[in-house]
Amino acid sequence: MAYNADILLGTIIKVHGYEGTVTVKLEKAFTENIPEMESVFLEIEGKPVPFFISESDYPGGNILRLKFDGYESIEKVAGFTGCKIFLTCRNNGISLSENIDELTGYMVYLPDNSLVGIVTEIINNSGQKLLIISSEKEKEILIPLHDDLVVKTDKNKHIIVMDLPDGLTDMN
């Protein structure tokens, strides 16, 4: 689980109820698009501390309620008020919120280590980013760049591992 200080989910504004639930005021970017989360980082005394989420509730607007594993009382979460919450970076390398233009030249593999090809271009459509990949057979493949498809990235080796739906590479 990697910490990503670039993706601020929001700030804990108060404790909700008696069972350790906290109320989070969401950043504008997340008010209509709550990501699925298993864990987050709380910034406590300037340092990132990982927490696993046991329950979440989105009542609407800019409010999200979270409950963390092992924190089932007001006393345990009272000190979290004012803490910033950051999302985890699942893919252990490049965050897709970063400048994705640097992905040009990366080699794309499937989880079974088979090579799909090399990223030659990124198309930045509104709402969807597409990778243009040149395969070994000199064929161009269009693949959507989405968090759910990226298994991991390695910035040092210029590698992206993607779990693609069956037949996607054959469609292009």
Image (tube, rainbow, N blue to C red):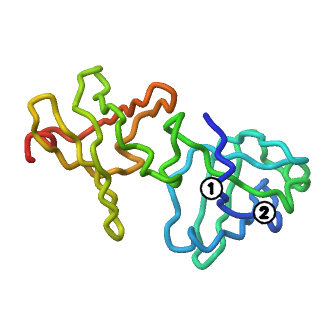
- Front-most of 77 and 72? 77
Report the residue at 24% width, 22% height from top.
114
Residue 163 is left or right of residue 17, and the answer is left
Q: Please, what secondary structure does the residue beneath circle 1 have?
A: strand
Q: Position of residue 159 (x, y in %)?
A: 40, 30
* Three-letter residue code for mark 1: Ile
Q: Give the residue at mark 1.
A: 7
Name above or below for residue 105 compared with residue 4: above
- Residue 166 image label: none
- The mark nearer the N terminus, 2 or 1, is 1
Q: Please, what secondary structure does the residue beneath circle 2 have?
A: strand
Q: Give the residue at mark 2.
A: 12
Report the residue at 45% width, 25% height from top.
157
Q: Residues within 10 Å of mark 2 (few under 14, many from 20)?
A: many
Q: Position of residue 166 (x, y in %)?
A: 16, 38
Q: Nearer the viewer, mark 2 or mark 1?
A: 1
